[in-house]
Image: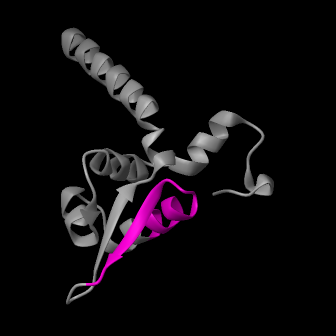
Amino acid sequence: MLTKEELPPCPVATCFQLFGNKWKIYIIQQLKERAFGFNELQRSIVGISQKVLSSNLKEMEAAGLVTRTVIPETPIRTEYALSEVGESLMPVINSMVEWGSGYQRLVREDG
């Protein structure tokens, strides 16, 4: 979670700070369906590098949006899932999907 000092004064800026890049949105979209192992998650997001995925997951875990579970298998496996806070983003994400779909339809009709 962010500290009080890290919170921007604007609520919209808070949202952008927490999940305002394209990779975090893609990660959230994948994790809304189910938990993923790291490599499986990387394969499901076209174009994301291991470094970028790792960095974004660490930021999202620190912000309380995802949970990280170490599964004691051989080899050890790590699984990521949306936390309760991350799940609370779904109405926002669903609104974005709805708006984006409408915009795409509009562009297709005009073009």
Q: Position of residue 91 (x, y in %)?
A: 43, 29
- Please identify the quadrant where the N terminus is shown: bottom right
**Image quarter of residue 79:** bottom left
- Residue at 37% from the left image edge and 71% from the top image edge: 69
Report the magenta residues as a range: 55-72
Q: Is residue 103 above or below residue 41?
A: above
Whether residue 32 sits left or right of residue 10 in the image: it is: left
In this view, which residue lies farthest toward the front?
72
Is 103 a magenta residue? no
Whether residue 79 sits left or right of residue 40 in the image: it is: right
- Please identify the quadrant where the C terminus is shown: top left
Whether residue 97 sits left or right of residue 16 in the image: it is: left
- Residue at 80% from the left image edge and 56% from the top image edge: 5
- Residue at 78% from the left image edge and 53% from the top image edge: 4
Q: Is residue 36 above or below residue 85?
A: below
Q: Position of residue 20 (x, y in %)?
A: 51, 45
Is 70 a magenta residue? yes
Q: Position of residue 93 (x, y in %)?
A: 40, 34
**Image quarter of residue 39:** bottom left
Foreground of the two, 26 or 34:
34
Q: Position of residue 95 (x, y in %)?
A: 40, 24
- Residue at 78% from the left image edge and 40% from the top image edge: 9
Foreground of the two, 94 or 33:
33
